[in-house]
Image (tube, grey):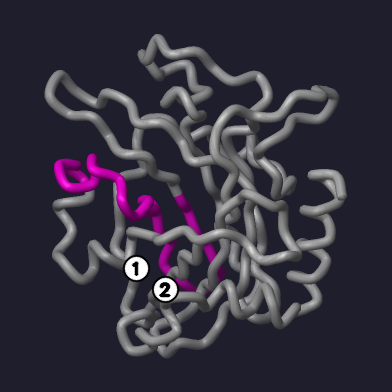
Amino acid sequence: MSQSKSLLTARRNFLKNSAAIGALALGAKAAQAADSCRSTPKQSLGPFYPGEKNFGADLDLTSVPGRPARAIGKVVYVTGKVLDVECRPLENANVEIWQACASGRYNHDRDPNSAPLDPNFRYWSEAFTNKNGEYLFKTIIPGAYPADVDWIRPPHIHFRITKLGYKELVTQMYFAGESLNVTDHLLNQVPGQERNSLIVNFQPVGADLEPGTLIGSFSITLSRVRG
């Protein structure tokens, strides 16, 4: 099966409330139901937010229309649920993601990084959650990059989640096992257990997704606007 057909199949199953995708979305967090409904910690928007007009609904960031080559890097599926603080799924929440390519560079004019851009990587996308609060993206593990003379940022993906009636959340998702997580200034500003909620363990995919790739579950909890 081709890469595009594989993702299309997964997306169709996802939108139809596939039991397989639903189970993956809950994943390792199923045993942490009480903690999972605490508001997700906020993180910096960062200087490389692409702007709302640049986001598109293509869930596959690993290829660019009209280009036969694939993005450089380890392919991963990022899935999860958007919930409220009472653990109820939020339908039609807008989930934006943006990130660096495998070299650690953002596709942004303000990025001073001299690493090469990847012309076959999309860099950002958005999704809207289904009736079970689920979302799904296919991307690559981004590269680390220098944020200051003594600070190398670990691989991470930026998230911005909005839903009418709920507080906007900007946060970042990190990859378990990355040694740079231990010394990252932003990640370590978050208290211990809350910090762990931002770090995702990726595992080999099942038979319904592209062989040799990884999947991880990053669920997000929003707080309601009071008024």
Q: Determine which quarter of the picture holds residue 53.
A: top right
Query: What residue is drawn where x is 59% and y is 67%?
Result: 93
- The residue nearer to you, when weighing 87 against 65, is 65
- Disc 2 residue type (three-letter): Thr
Query: What residue is drawn where x is 66% and y is 66%?
Result: 206
- The residue nearer to you, when weighing 156 against 94, is 156
Residue at numbered disc 1: 40
Above or below: residue 208 compared with residue 28? above
Q: Position of residue 155 (x, y in %)?
A: 37, 40
Q: Determine which quarter of the picture holds residue 151.
A: top left
Q: Which residues are magenta?
A: 159-186
Measure the alpha-carbon separation of dots 1 and 2. Answer: 5 Å
Q: Residues within 10 Å of mark 1 (few under 14, many from 20)?
A: many
The reply to whether dot 1 and dot 2 touch (C-beta < 8 Å) is yes
Q: Position of residue 166 (x, y in %)?
A: 46, 72
Quarter placement of the C terminus: bottom left
Above or below: residue 54 compared with residue 226? above
- The residue nearer to you, when weighing 69 against 38, is 69
Q: Position of residue 3 (x, y in %)?
A: 79, 44
Does the segment drawn in magenta span residue 89? Answer: no
Q: Residue 221 has which mark?
A: 2
In the displayed orientation, state which residue is furthest to the top: 114
Above or below: residue 119 compared with residue 196? above
Q: Position of residue 184 (x, y in %)?
A: 19, 42
Between discs 1 and 2, the one toward the N terminus: 1
